[in-house]
Image (spheres, grey):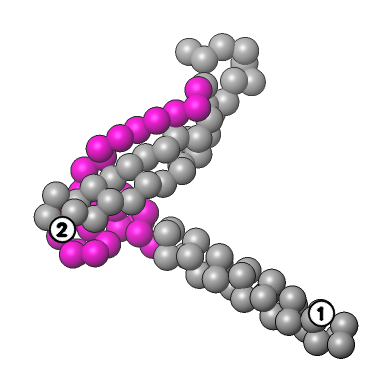
Amino acid sequence: MNFYLLFFLLIIIIGSIVSYIYFMREKKANLQAIQQGICPKCHKENMELVDQRSTGCGGPKLLTFECKNCDYVNTFNVDIGGGCSSGSCG
């Protein structure tokens, strides 16, 4: 009985990992298209940066893009590098 439960849990965990990897690859492809100004949904050049938030000095930024043609909206957490290792945020 315990063997079937372990097998079921293993299948669920492997499925979750594969789904997450697929999701991240699709998200990466969408970001690459958006960086070129092309909407991943309608494939037209109508992408605009509508919101940009940061956690502070050199931290990751939360970027929200929107297509004015088809109302596609997506948010990306982008690490801009840098950092506060020098002690100042200039």
Image quadrant holding the N terminus, namely bottom right
Q: Is residue 5 magenta?
A: no
Q: Residue at x 56, y 12 (%)?
A: 88
Dot 2 lies on which element?
A: loop
Left/right placement of residue 44 relative to residue 86 reads: left
Q: Is residue 69 above or below residue 42?
A: above
- Crowding at dot 1, Cα within 10 Å, few <14 / some 14-19 / many 20+, comes out as few
> Percent x, y for residue 85?
64, 20
In which quadrant of the rendered view does residue 26 lie?
bottom left
Residue 63 in sight here: yes
Kind of element beneath mark 1: helix
Which residue is situated farthest in the left direction here?
69
Give me the C-alpha separation between circle 2 and circle 1.
45 Å
Pinpoint residue 67: horizontal percent, then vertical percent. Answer: 19, 51
Crowd tier of the residue under label 2, counting other residues whose Cα lies within 10 Å: few below 14, some 14–19, many 20 or above: some
Task: Name, please, the residue furthest toward the right.
Answer: 2
Residue 40 horizontal/vertical position (percent) = 27, 62
Q: Which numbered dot is residue 70?
A: 2
Q: In this rendering, does residue 45 appear at all?
A: no
Say which of marks 2 and 1 sits in front: 1
Residue 1, above or below 18: below
The amino acid type, in three-letter code, at marker 1 is Leu
Q: On screen, 89 above or below 3? A: above
Q: Return the residue nearer the eye: 39 or 11.
A: 11
**Tag of residue 6:** 1
Label 2–label 1 contact, CB within 8 A: no
Magenta span of residues = 29-56
